[in-house]
């Protein structure tokens, strides 16, 4: 899973490609590279490590040209080294290729190429692509690409340059996203619009099984048989402002942006289309991965509590073949910050093909998911750069709670008075998140205690358990501490055996009806030698003695994940900082996972 970019036009390609790669680093940061046509040859520079390593390498060399491709990598096949970095070049440097996705039949292709004398230098699935195109080249690049496409299996997006066509780039799409952009007498390719939005005000998403040829003079579209296809550019809609805080880590500044983003999100709801989709729904299924899935779990709890409706949330990568649960009256809610997560896209597509209506809750207006969906609710929390979902998770929960209330109202599951009451409580949440943000210094103190834990268990019941799952994911993701989330009541059925000195339990307790049970959980772990942190509603804290007690503003228990999540995001952030971790770009991860 990687980011690819391409440029052809009247400007120097290297700075444009680097700018694109900077925006795409969220898709992987194991290595990066560029290939530029300098009028005579393809110049390739690539480096393992962060983009800065490539920038340093390029600063030492003259790489000039107005046409090129670039890549930022998240390793799937072959470790992160210079040798495994893209672009890959065919023998004698005739073709250079950047690849996002997976070539599933690369081993037989590699054997086929080796038998014909080709030597492969990397451990990747991607390198065969460049050699295969070269192998099929008999004087026409497009025909060679088509021949190669008839052999390659898997899902991928490609950028290709060739020594034979000095001012031309090709883009190929088979199941992985690729955007074609048009600027002022210049064209670009990119895994998403963010990498080229500075200069491309018109774009179109490449369809599956298509090849686009971009030259200074214009664009042309082909299918995999080489037949010309029609296309048209559309005007790009503006995404939300990118309000990055100077000098602060992205994760920290994104946590601090939560109140502002909720105020904004609240103004934009409900739209007529969302209301119509809810009105026709007889049952619901939520799909998402990671934090987005956890937001779905909060929705399930809210739907049960408020509307009395049982809703399922599925981890998108587990929703592989199941269709029986879907009817034409099912509303599938696909939740995704990026709208590019491959598992979520595949699951949403499968659900749609099975007859469901698809509602996307997504933070990127022009994304693969919003294009696939029948109707979209854009969370509008602005660009999220840090790999850890923070403001986007809170915005997803908030949006899903609004959806829950609208549904309960439209389908008369609650009275008008109840609706007004819930609305009022919901409207108070943005302000209450401000209160949580104000407790940042104290949360840092607690995080400094957690940072030395041998393991951290996040515990809760019902909605608090859903929130605990997100808290645990955040901590392990950025601080690399071992962490697990567990339903408090289940502890005594096995996991309690792990409680001992050095272990921390973070107990999320926001439901007055569960106060005694939560107090019992704290005692259970403390008397086994573990340390305790309680994250509880203000009115409950006095009954929940623990080593550290964090009070969050009172709200309805089903709404409280909006607040408790922020506390746990701070725990993760400050613990990771204290442990010297790269909080914005944790090891082994990428912001957007565009492979299955
Ligand atoms: O872009 P998406 O919301 O679809 O991403 C889904 C997950 O990859 C994402 O939430 C991931 O779990 C976060 N890095 C967690 O902080």
Image (spheres, grey):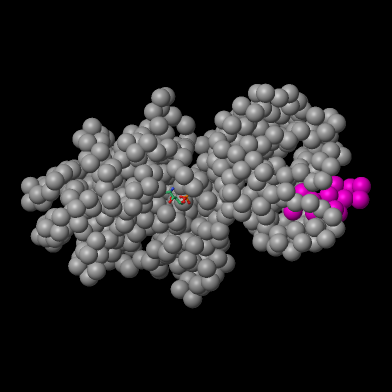
Is residue 81 at least partly visible in the picture? yes
Residue 135 magenta: yes
Q: Residue at x 14, y 46 (%)?
A: 547
Q: Residue at x 47, y 31 (%)?
A: 242
Q: Nearer the viewer, residue 539 or 12?
A: 12
**Percent position of residue 181, x then y:** 67, 38
What secondary structure prevails in the magenta region?
helix
**Percent position of residue 587, x then y:** 47, 44
Q: Is residue 28 left or right of residue 64?
A: left
The residue lying furthest to the right in this view is 139
Q: Quadrant of residue 596?
A: bottom right
The residue lying furthest to the left in this view is 543
**Percent position of residue 53, x then y:** 59, 31
Q: Residue at x 70, y 34 (%)?
A: 45
Q: Residue at x 48, y 53 (%)?
A: 360
Q: Quadrant of residue 446?
A: top left
């Amino acid at each position: 899973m990687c980011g690819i970019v391409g440029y052809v036009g009247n400007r120097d390609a290297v700075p444009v490609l680097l700018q694109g790669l900077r925006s795409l680093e969220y898709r992987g940061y194991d290595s990066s590279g560029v290939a530029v046509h300098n009028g005579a040859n393809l110049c390739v520079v690539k480096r393992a490590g962060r983009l800065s390593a490539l920038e340093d390498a390029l600063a030492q060399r003259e790489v000039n040209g107005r046409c090129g491709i670039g890549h930022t990598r998240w390793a799937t096949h072959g470790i992160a080294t210079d040798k495994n970095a893209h672009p890959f070049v065919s023998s004698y440097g005739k073709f250079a290729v950047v690849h996002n996705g997976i070539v599933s039949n690369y081993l037989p292709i590699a054997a086929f190429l080796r038998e014909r004398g080709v030597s492969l230098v990397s451990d990747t699935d991607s390198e065969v692509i460049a050699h295969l195109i070269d192998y099929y080249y008999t004087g026409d690049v497009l025909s060679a690409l088509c021949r190669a496409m008839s052999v390659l299996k898997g899902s991928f997006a490609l950028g290709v340059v060739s020594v034979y066509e000095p001012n031309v780039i090709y883009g190929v799409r088979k199941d992985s996203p690729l955007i074609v952009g048009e600027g002022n007498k210049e064209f670009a390719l990119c895994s998403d619009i963010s990498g080229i939005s500075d200069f491309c005000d018109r774009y179109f998403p490449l369809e599956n099984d298509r090849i686009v040829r971009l030259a200074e003079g214009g664009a042309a579209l082909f299918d995999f048989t080489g037949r010309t296809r029609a296309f048209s550019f559309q005007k790009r809609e503006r995404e939300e402002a990118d309000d990055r805080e100077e000098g602060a880590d992205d994760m920290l500044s994104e946590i601090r942006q939560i109140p502002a983003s909720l105020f904004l999100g609240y103004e934009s709801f409900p739209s007529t289309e969302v209301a119509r989709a809810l009105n026709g729904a007889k049952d619901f299924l939520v799909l998402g991965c990671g934090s987005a899935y956890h937001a779905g779990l909060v929705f399930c709890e809210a739907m049960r509590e408020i509307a009395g409706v049982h809703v399922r949330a599925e981890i998108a990568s587990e929703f592989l073949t199941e269709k029986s649960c879907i009817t034409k009256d099912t509303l599938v809610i696909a939740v995704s910050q990026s709208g590019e997560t491959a598992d979520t896209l595949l699951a949403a597509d499968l659900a749609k093909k099975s007859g469901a209506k698809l509602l996307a809750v997504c933070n990127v207006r022009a994304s693969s998911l919003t294009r696939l969906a029948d109707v979209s609710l854009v969370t509008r929390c602005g660009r999220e750069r840090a790999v850890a979902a923070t403001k986007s998770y809170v915005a997803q929960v908030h949006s899903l709670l609004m959806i829950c209330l609208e549904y309960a109202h439209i389908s008369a599951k609650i009275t008008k008075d109840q609706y007004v009451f819930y609305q009022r409580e919901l409207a108070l949440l943005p302000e209450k998140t401000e209160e949580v943000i104000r407790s940042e210094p104290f949360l840092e103190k607690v995080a400094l205690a957690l940072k030395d834990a041998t393991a951290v268990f996040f515990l809760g019941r019902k909605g608090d358990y859903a929130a605990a799952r997100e808290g645990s994911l955040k901590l392990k993701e950025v601080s690399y501490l071992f962490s697990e989330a567990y339903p408090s009541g289940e502890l005594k059925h096995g996991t309690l055996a792990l409680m001992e000195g050095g272990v921390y339990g973070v107990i999320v307790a926001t439901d007055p009806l569960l106060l005694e049970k939560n107090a019992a959980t704290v005692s259970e772990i403390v008397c086994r030698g573990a340390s305790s942190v309680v994250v509880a509603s203000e009115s409950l804290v006095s009954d929940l003695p623990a080593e550290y007690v964090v009070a969050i503003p009172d709200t309805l228990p089903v709404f409280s994940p909006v607040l408790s999540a922020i506390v746990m995001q701070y725990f993760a952030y400050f613990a990771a900082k204290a442990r010297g971790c790269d909080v914005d770009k944790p090891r082994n991860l990428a912001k957007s996972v565009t492979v299955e």
